[in-house]
Amino acid sequence: MTKAPILEVRGLDSYYRQGTDTLWRKKRTQVLKKVSFTLGQGEVLGIVGESGSGKSTLAKVILGISRDYEGEIVHHSMRPQMVFQDPYASLNPAFTVGRIVEEPLIIYGKYDVHERKRRVIDMLEDVGLGEEFLVCRPHELSGGQRQRVSIATAMIVRPKLVILDEAVSALDVTIQDQILDLLVRLKKENNLSYLFISHDLNVVYQCCDRVMVMKSGEVVEENTVDGIFDAPQHPYTKKLLLAAE
Ligand SMILES: Nc1ncnc2c1ncn2[C@@H]1O[C@H](COP(=O)(O)OP(=O)(O)OP(=O)(O)O)[C@@H](O)[C@H]1O
Ligand SMILES: [Mg+2]
């Protein structure tokens, strides 16, 4: 039985304003070309492809950060969230960890201050950080701890869909494994769906159910993780696999 969809993308074309023409007008350059896929509830879909193939652009269009697109994006969940590669850039350095994780709840506006504080402490514990981290600032944390804070910040609004854009790429291998374990546990406990963007095929192999391969803004192949790794069809997929060996 196929799973109910959490996200459907159909015929997505997207554009950036890049460079100028002879009259100094910004040119509209197409990045994504006819991207279509469905992500099921509780599923992890890996997105791989060389640098510049449009992986982050796809994430940004899906979350409404990049708005110049044509095609259809159907969300079947509320408040989809994103976790970035570099928590240094995405965590406000002036705020304490407690305040950073509380921020989405303040914006969401549904809980009073006591409920918020309680949920922040529970969430931090859930990502393996004790109460002593509440008053730390991002620069006082290790890379792994910072990524735990980013994950807590994404998960605190109880999303059903989380887009992870190179979320473990900046970490060394041991810490990478710890963060992947954390992501897998949170996914199981909350029946989450992940769009898992990574240039690292080993990581994708470890945690994805299906994989979509992108090249120059197009999807060249999509299959189960075993299908992609055991029987790649497209020459580009074969090339990526060879390069990762
Ligand atoms: N804000 C922007 N304005 C204009 N062009 C952009 C912008 N962001 C990305 N691009 C261009 O869009 C194309 C796809 O970039 P994108 O960041 O989606 O690639 P990627 O697959 O995520 O690469 P990487 O693996 O390096 O993160 C590139 O040619 C890039 O230069
Ligand atoms: Mg990217």
Image: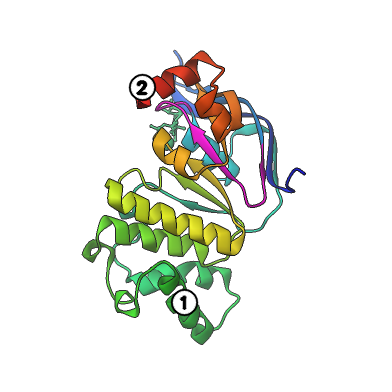
Q: Is residue 155 magenta?
A: no
Amino acid residing under circle 2:
Ala
Above or below, 30 against 78 in this view is above
Residue beneath label 2, please?
A: 243
Q: Quadrant of the N terminus?
A: top right
| Mark 2 surroundings: few (<14), some (14-19) or many (≥20) residues within 10 A | few
Q: Quadrant of residue 100?
A: bottom left
Image quadrant holding the C terminus, namely top left
Closer to the camera, 114 or 205?
A: 205
Instruction: Give the residue at x 32% y 71%.
Output: 96
- Where residue 16 sits: x, y (%)? 51, 29
Residue occupying the point 49% across, 30% down: 54
Image color mode? rainbow
Per the rendering, the mark at residue 122 is 1
Question: Where does the image place residue 3, in percent across and percent down from the top left?
Answer: 73, 47
Percent coordinates x, y for residue 231 in the rendering: 55, 22
Q: Residue at x 41, y 74 (%)?
A: 125
Amino acid found under the numbered disc labelled 1: Asp
Write the start and end of the magenta stretch as one range. 38-53
* C-alpha separation, residue under disc 2 versus residue under disc 1: 42 Å
SS for callout 1 = helix
**52, 206: nearer the viewer:** 206
235 to 132, vertically: above or below: above
On screen, residue 195 above or below 14: below
Q: Is residue 45 magenta?
A: yes
Residue furthest left as drawn = 140
The local secondary structure at tag 2 comes to: helix
